[in-house]
Image (cartoon, rainbow, N blue to C red):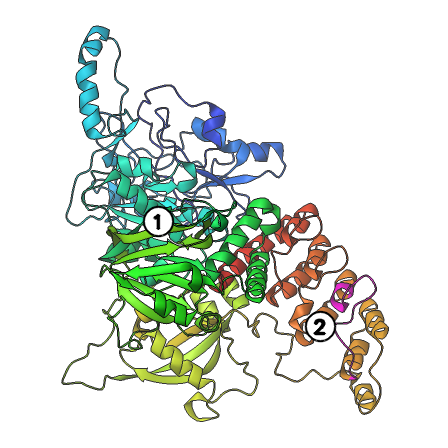
Amino acid sequence: KAITKSGLQHLAPAPPTPGAPCSESERQIRSTVDWSESATYGEHIWFETNVSGDFCYVGEQYCVARMLQKSVSRRKCAACKIVVHTPCIEQLEKINFRCKPSFRESGSRNVREGFQQKFTFHSKEIVAISCSWCKQAYHSKVSCFMLQQIEEPCSLGVHAAVVIPPTWILRARRPQNTLKASKKKKRASFKRKSSKKGPEEGRWRPFIIRPTPSPLMKPLLVFVNPKSGGNQGAKIIQSFLWYLNPRQVFDLSQGGPKEALEMYRKVHNLRILACGGDGTVGWILSTLDQLRLKPPPPVAILPLGTGNDLARTLNWGGGYTDEPVSKILSHVEEGNVVQLDRWDLHAEPNPEAGPEDRDEGATDRLPLDVFNNYFSLGFDAHVTLEFHESREANPEKFNSRFRNKMFYAGTAFSDFLMGSSKDLAKHIRVVCDGTDLTPKIQDLKPQCVVFLNIPRYCAGTMPWGHPGEHHDFEPQRHDDGYLEVIGFTMTSLAALQVGGHGERLTQCREVVLTTSKAIPVQVDGEPCKLAASRIRIALRNQATMVQKAKRRSAAPLHSDQQPVPEQLRIQVSRVSMHDYEALHYDKEQLKEASVPLGTVVVPGDSDLELCRAHIERLQQEPDGAGAKSPTCQKLSPKWCFLDATTASRFYRIDRAQEHLNYVTEIAQDEIYILDPELLGASARPDLPTPTSPVPTSPCSPTVRSLQGDAAPPEGEELIEAAKRNDFCKLQELHRAGGDLMHRDEQSRTLLHHAVSTGSKDVVRYLLDHAPPEILDAVEENGETCLHQAAALGQRTICHYIVEAGASLMKTDQQGDTPRQRAEKAQDTELAAYLENRQHYQMIQREDQETAV
């Protein structure tokens, strides 16, 4: 590679640091930005890393690990990308090797240069150096370096419009306390001024923001909830630290958004990116309400949660897959500013409820007093409440997304059987804009009533119906000051997941809801059992949001003179998940590994939603342009488009965002799609695909002789064949009707036995021909076959089982996942592989998660 090292520009002496310095141990292991007065100039932000190789950025002369001649852990700086052995971090101080500066000292003005004016190269292995700000790179020869940068300041890179320059962030000096008399004299007036500014503004802070406004800039604050979406936030925060100033990226688990918003409140044209679920967005919007910023900064969303209905409404999609952070920053910068209605909830006890209507387990207070998405009561709230209470009581039982989904399903089914919400209509009175809807509700007999602000609900469904389906009402909008009121029976709730909708009751500006007994309710997914109450819903305000824009730069424009747009003839090629994970950073290799599906002809201005319909039809065409190969597997329902043109690598496009992307933006002559349930020929070239014939073998004649009216073989014969690694015998027995799901007395499957003997051929045959349930089947000790393979360090077999779709989140009786079993076996490479696949598996399942 031409460029192997980055961040080497910051080698000049640091300016003096005021205040007490940090201790060595504090500086060595910081994984967050230091906002205290003792913050170190050019301090690194360290994260553990599993990157390959053993190079250490301190160089051979200072490398402690090389001197000790033993393997030690390494850490990577998220802000400048250098990697060092953990014991070598202290050596960085000695060689004056600092991170990119994120602020300036009081009295200093010249921080914006990308390359410093003093260079020291510590290793002959360094081929080139790059700027951690603008990412430009040059050969490490001083002549190349100085030729480009001697008089040119750093541009801060392609995202300079959203980057907060370090020159804006000033370390403040603590006020001197020597003039005590003067201080006492001015104390009263100081308190009066402070009270006018608010409780936060009058307090001294170690850092102050002094922006230099520019009409072209849209400075960005990034708030990341590291716990959202299976801890995706903890991984993505590192990418933002690299692209932006680390002091504009905030971890919400470190105190919330209030301090940062207060500090940056005077920055002109400020924008916010909320990385998390809809609850995270609501948290930030409520904080903005408290601070009363004028004008309020618009909020964009990077969806990391499970429902993400608000994110879907604003075109940000149903969940983050792997879109490059650089593209996300461009979308935030180019997005349209829109308004979002927010609704007040005021609940008070129902004075007409008698003692017999009281419930000791009920509360008089709602979990939230404002909602952005919806307020509901009845069946859906009851299911959510059951899950919430069970998780609070036994958190250790809810450490798996799969278990959580099963609990939701089981609770919903039991609630349906018990009919706990079937009498909902008898205990509520609903008045909308002065009109009593109670008779209509009693006729409908709903088991759930939803007051909806946005079109999406329950992880992407559309309970009001699709546009054009409700001619008796105005089109649904999130900024019109109206709520949609919808009733659901059990039938319509079930149909909701397959494109159905509820009973449209009304659209209104104000609701008065009266309940005569304790009823489960939920506010934007936060449930409680509310005592008999009188609830008033009214418009609170409008939040300013950023909606992801649909770019039209590459698409032909409609015109009256051209009613039929130009057509595009595009080859469609399919990529397997195995190839994608292994090669998505190498476009050319991934293109070579793809398998042609056929050709589609679409209008020139087609978006991906329309293109999807053409590709689905392509699978059904028997011949012609869309002829299918006889060995071609049918696409699974979970396939998605790949962007092959607008980034340095392939990346997936969320299905909820297909209407925002034109075919011409992601493809030229060929369009690529990813099927996550397909192994692909390149993943396992020596295996037959499920639709191809089983390869012939010396045992084939015997197989034919066993066919006919002969009785199926006993399960013990199959077990023995798996134990002896007798592939031919196993195949014969299966052809003769043997049950591949047979278990022994310890509940061990054939796959368990094949793994224990390390039989790759038998494992592959079982993965191809046994029902999918065999993958996650457990024996008496709770182990799956993947647990067993990981404990034995069988890397190839682990790969086969993972790519076949086995769960990486299942735990055995000791609570260990397969990754943890590999760690206990001290196979760090296998553990790292399983951790990586576990992350992808969580991403793939994100869209199937629901809040109800």
- Dot 2: few (<14), some (14–19), or many (≥20) neighbours within 10 Å? many
Tell me which residue sits at (47%, 80%) in the image: 596
Location of residue 94 in the rendering, given as x and y in whole percent from the top left corner: 44, 26
As rendered, which of 415 and 643 lies closer to the eye? Answer: 415
Residue holding disc 1: 282
Local packing at callout 1 (Cα closer than 10 Å; few below 14, some 14-19, many 20+) is some
Kindly identify which residue carries mark 2: 766
Considering only vertical position in the picture, is 142 above or below 273?
above
Report the span colored magenta.
736-753
Of the pair 79 and 774, the residue shown nearer to us: 774
Q: What residue type is labelled 1?
A: Gly
- The spot of residue 468 in percent (x, y) is 28, 77
In this image, 579 relative to 81: left or right?
Answer: right
Secondary structure category for the residue under label 1: helix
Q: Quadrant of residue 774?
A: bottom right
Let me know if residue 486 appears in the view: yes
- Where is residue 264? Give x, y as percent: 25, 38
At a point 43% along the width and 93% down the height, the residue shown is 624
- Magenta region includes residue 533: no
Residue type at the position of mark 2: Leu
Describe residue 532's horizontal placement relative to residue 778 as left or right.
left
**Image quadrant containing the N terminus:** bottom left
